[in-house]
Image: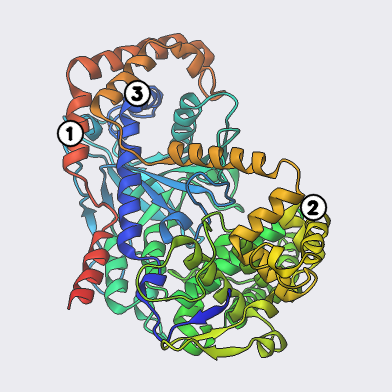
Amino acid sequence: MADLAISSMVRRELQTHSVILYAGLVTNTLRNSLLWLAHAPLWTVLQRAEAAVAECRNCTPFGRLSVLQISQSGSTAESFSDIKPGQPSTSDHDAMYELGPCRWQVPWTGGDEPAAQGVPEVSPAPGRLSGAAHRPPPLLRVEPCATPGFVTLWVMPEVGCAHDSPLPLSAATVRRLMFNMQRVKHKLEDSITITGPSAALDGPSQIYGGIDMVSCFHLPVWPAAEFRTRHRANQFPPAAARDDICRFGVHLVPTGHKASCKELFEAQLRLSFSRAEVVAAWHMNQHQQTALKRVKRLKNELKKTGAVQLKSYFIKTAVLWLCQDASIESWSSITEAVSMILSWLENAVNRKHLPCFFWAEINLLDGFSAADLEATKDDIGRMREDLTRALLAQCIGQCAMDPLLAGPPEPLIRAGAPSAGSYSQQLLLLHAFLVAPDDVIGEMRLTSTGDGLLAWDAAPLFRLLTDQDMNELFGSYEAVQAWWSQQLSLPPAERPPGLTVPLDTPQGQKELLLNAELHTQACSASIPRWKTVHALLDHLEGQRWKNNNLTLPSKQRCKEWLQDLRNSDLEEKLRRSDQIDSEKVADLAEQWRREMDRYLLDTGLGVDYDILRTQFQDRWWLRQYVLAERLVAEG
């Protein structure tokens, strides 16, 4: 029996726990920071080169900007990505390289309090990562642009400057610094391109959707009073979380508005609400998270047929607004919730106005051409066309090929600790049940198991699978059918256990797809080299898990990396970037080597390593949400 059962109790463990999310973020951040140590001397040299050509070498921030923290952001931090260690994925990694420390002059109040002047930045830990320890942090003035959500930065004069007026800080230079840093670090076969504010990495070494590496500044001021005061049908996110979001502020990333002239585009920075998005995502309930993931998967399926104009950020924005304004009952059906999200997006595109959730004056569609809007609308329409079918395919297809399934599935979801394979399989069947058409649900027999649970026979779900679906799952479905028919012709006592009915029936497909031993036997006997191929896949999967394990490098290993880098062909590495003057390569290589020697000899690397391992700074203030959840649970 492989039936679908639902317990009368919805357990917290079915949700992604914030403790697990936070632990992953901390480990990832710490590991990235330790790996950065070997490249800190290069960062110093590249900044020094920019400072040498600055309009004023006295007050320029370049030479004083450290990478304070490398933070994971986007869907991986919010738990909306499909990334699993060692497995291919369409999601990308978003890494935000926070530069500082800085002091700020800002125009916004974020409420009724007086305008902030000279807002202090949190001081970094001492050591090499602090940058120029004997210079005060630069004082930057923020000037809003005419288009909401974009600003320019101006460097205020300091003692010793020959000028009295502030000088512009070029966002293009900040982008170029990160691009040169990543281009020099990575192999030539890896593609590094500037995409918006990021240096985007893609290449043969990537099994994910790539890595977007973004320079950013933390501006500890909230720019939008409207976010505090707007009417909310639901208290989403909760009032305490909203206050925390505003206290933390925003990030600034180096990219301009697409409709700006070239000169202004090169100077502009965009407000980033990445940290606020993580906090809001952690406050979504399970139904809201599931609906968002389903829409993103629909978009990813659409991408297989060609280019897609609809942005994942638009989907997330729609869900945030609906979490605030739609009734809780609207989320009870996954199919209806997904349809609601698509309708909201469609209406926004028709109005040519998609407001940012954290500052409604920002129109995310501003600057989109008529062709872009039409293509986005077309994408939404195509996602609507076969909504139920696509959702079922996601659930049943994953369930049938679940790589964790190691034995015959248990028939029920039970309290306690179910095996990983059957638990995952049952959860996917539950998702399929929730989006199945009414006539299919009507065929599913409901019975009592005798121990307080109710169970449905899952077989009717499988009649929704087509021969094309089965061929995608098996590669050679006809061969499996032939083997199955041959076995079915044998006396019942001689048949493989669990094989009872023809394969062209829902019950037969259920027997094939949900009985792991029968599934393995059928494929091994009817598909040539199936065992060999799967043994190889198991080996490769194990290697990918090993390679993607986020182990923390030792201090000795960091020193060895730096020594190996010091003894390599530095000029060849610098020539990888077409934005580094070829005539300066030899001099930069020599400076880089001297910086590495100094970093090794004056124990700077060891000091910074000890600081990172013993004084981790939660610069995104996320630990409080883990502690708050634990306190509520314990109370």
> Does dot 2 land on a helix, a strand or a loop?
loop
Name the residue carrying label 1.
610
Badge 1 or badge 3: first in the primary sequence: 3
Q: Are marks 1 and 3 in contact (CB under 8 Å)?
A: no
Q: Is residue 483 left or right of residue 47?
A: right
Name the residue carrying label 3.
48
Residue pictured at 30% horizontal, 29% vertical: 37
Considering the image in quadrants, where does the C terminus appear? bottom left
| Amino acid type at image mark 2 | Ser
> Does dot 1 land on a helix, a strand or a loop?
helix
Q: Is residue 231 left or right of residue 208?
A: left
Q: CA distance from mark 2 to mark 1?
A: 56 Å
Foreground: disc 3 or disc 2: 2
**Front residue of 428 and 110:** 428
Foreground: disc 2 or disc 1: 2
Q: Position of residue 438 (x, y in %)?
A: 68, 88
Name the residue carrying label 2.
476
At label 1, counting other C-alpha atoms closer than 10 Å, the crowd grade (few under 14, some 14-19, many 20 or more) is few
Foreground: disc 1 or disc 3: 1
In the picture shown, does residue 399 fall above or below 206?
Answer: below
| Amino acid type at image mark 3 | Arg
Considering the image in quadrants, where does the N terminus appear? bottom right
Q: CA distance from mark 3 to mark 2?
A: 61 Å
The answer to which image quadrant residue 604 occupies is top left
Q: Position of residue 365 (x, y in %)?
A: 61, 64
Residue pictured at 41% horizontal, 88% vertical: 452
Q: CA distance from mark 1 to mark 3?
A: 26 Å
